[in-house]
Image (cartoon, rainbow, N blue to C red):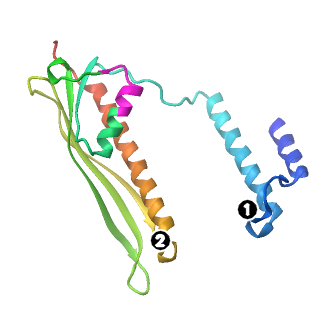
């Protein structure tokens, strides 16, 4: 097994000398080796997935060629919809509703947070974050191709007052992940519409 032989040789090499010892927890050489092995294992796993036929998402073919995006200017979800449609689908984004075969309208987006558990002092210990978005798709005559649809993404997050800044960063990343999830769902639903001839 080539991978096993490579991992064994990596064990013999020890930590890279270019890494300052202060970047390794407590100066622990084993931690450096384990981190390197974990990275190699992740690469091997991804190689195995590709070998078994797994592929990353490619360009999506939509049943429409001309799409108008009626999205709020300051909407993070709207901005990502525009980016994904332009970069990952066959549709051309047009500047006029009249030119379009379909129009995406983002009707609303809302961030929510709910306490899931509390500690002995009655303070929140775990939250559930939610991102909710509502959209519809119409043709230039106002006929609904997709009726108003609400999508919700959820993520749980533990809270620790001593790590406030780190938790704020983690929460921001989770919202970004949920946003990407919802945008993928919206774009996927475009594949089922039946536009009228224009």
Tell me residue 39's x, y (percent): 70, 47
Instruction: Determine if residue 64 is in view.
Output: no
In this picture, which residue range is highlighted in magenta?
A: 83-92
Q: Residue furthest bottom?
A: 121
Label 2 secondary element = helix
Placement of the C terminus among the 4 image quadrants: top left
Furthest toward the top, the residue is 198
Kindly identify which residue carries mark 1. Answer: 23
Pick whichever, 164 or 56, lies toward us.
Answer: 164
Q: Position of residue 106 (x, y in %)?
A: 21, 40
Residue 8: x and y in percent read 87, 47
Residue 164: mark in rendering: 2
- Dot 1: element: helix
Please say if 93 is above or below 129: above
Give the mark, 2 or 1, whose residue is nearer the N terminus: 1
Which residue is painted at 40% across and 24% down in the image?
60
The residue that appears at 71% across and 50% down in the rendered structure is: 38
Is residue 5 something that shows in the picture? yes
Q: Is residue 81 in the magenta section?
A: no
């Amino acid at each position: 097994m080539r991978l096993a032989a490579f991992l064994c040789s990596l064990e013999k090499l020890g930590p890279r000398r270019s890494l300052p010892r202060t970047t390794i927890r407590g100066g622990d050489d084993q931690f450096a080796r384990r981190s390197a092995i974990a990275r190699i294992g992740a690469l091997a796993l991804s190689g195995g997935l590709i070998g078994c036929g797994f592929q990353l998402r490619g360009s999506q073919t939509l049943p429409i060629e001309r799409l108008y995006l009626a999205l709020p200017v300051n909407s993070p979800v709207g901005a990502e919809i525009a980016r994904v449609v332009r970069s990952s689908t066959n549709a051309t984004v047009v500047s006029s509703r009249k030119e379009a075969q379909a129009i995406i309208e983002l009707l609303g987006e809302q961030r929510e947070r709910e306490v899931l558990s509390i500690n002995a002092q009655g303070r929140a210990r775990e939250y559930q974050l939610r991102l909710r978005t509502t959209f519809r798709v119409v043709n230039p005559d106002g006929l609904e191709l997709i009726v108003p649809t609400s999508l919700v993404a959820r993520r749980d997050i533990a809270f620790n007052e001593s790590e406030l800044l780190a938790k704020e960063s983690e929460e921001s990343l989770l919202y970004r992940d949920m946003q990407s999830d919802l945008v993928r769902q919206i774009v996927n639903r475009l594949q089922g519409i039946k536009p009228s001839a224009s």
